[in-house]
């Protein structure tokens, strides 16, 4: 074998060895990464079981005050603390989202009284309250999204289920399908 052939064989062997090392490391890094995303949908009026809470979306409606203004998406809910301790259910207001396929509204308006009640939800108590999201009028008027709104529930309220699903390499979320 001449020198040129030996050099080519050594270079090819080094490239193959480095490629195998990179592939091994890539698999090692990604071994415990979630591979799928599971969403569990509910309908209006259905009980949504959360950690120590039960949630029901009772109704929703869209209200436009003046032509061209944003539209209020008004969601009426009921939440019940099913535990024997006081729970902070305020993440429902702070981290839940109203969304279509492409747009999400993550700021909800609620009365101070209802918010304070959610912040310290007493054992076995329940509260009816209303969340209001401001939605751009074009999102509703385009006809495509009218029946596609979903109310995504804050992950903090069902952490135990999320952890259980993640052990099976799945990401997980819950939403209520708002359909007229």
Image (tube, rainbow, N blue to C red):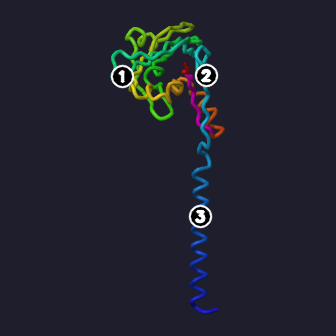
Residue 21 numbered mark, or none: 3
Residue lying furthest right: 168
Crowd band around label 3 with a 10 angstrom C-alpha radius: few (<14), some (14–19), many (20+): few
Q: Residue sitting at 57 percent across and 85 percent down? A: 7
**Residue 156, can we see it?**
no
Of marks 2 and 3, the one in the foreground:
2
The tag earlier along the polypeptide, 2 or 1, is: 2
Would you say the residues marked 2 and 1 are in contact, meaning their CB atoms lie under 8 Å apart? no
Residue position marked by numbered label 2 in the rendering: 42
Mark 2 lies on a secondary structure that is strand
Q: Secondary structure at mark 3?
A: helix
Quadrant of the rendered image containing residue 125: top right
Which quarter of the figure is the N terminus placed in? bottom right
Q: Is residue 159 above or below residue 118?
A: below
Q: Quadrant of residue 45?
A: top right
Magenta part of the protein: which range? 170-177
Which comes sooner in the sequence, label 2 or label 3?
3
């Amino acid at each position: 074998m001449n020198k040129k052939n030996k050099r080519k064989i050594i270079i090819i062997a080094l490239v193959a060895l480095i490629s195998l090392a990179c592939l091994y490391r890539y698999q090692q890094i990604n071994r415990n990464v979630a591979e799928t995303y599971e969403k569990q949908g509910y309908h209006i009026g259905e009980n949504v079981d959360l950690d120590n809470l039960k949630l029901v979306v009772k109704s929703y409606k869209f209200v436009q005050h003046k032509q061209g203004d944003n539209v209020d998406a008004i969601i009426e809910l009921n939440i019940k603390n099913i535990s024997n301790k006081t729970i902070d259910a305020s993440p429902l207001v702070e981290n839940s989202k109203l969304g279509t396929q492409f747009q999400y509204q993550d700021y909800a308006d609620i009365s101070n009284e209802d918010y304070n009640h959610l912040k310290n939800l007493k054992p076995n108590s329940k509260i009816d309250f209303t969340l209001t999201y401001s939605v751009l009028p074009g999102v509703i008027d385009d006809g495509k999204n009218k029946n596609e709104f979903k109310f995504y529930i804050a992950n903090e309220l069902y952490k135990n289920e999320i952890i259980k699903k993640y052990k099976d390499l799945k990401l997980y979320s819950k939403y209520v399908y708002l359909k007229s």
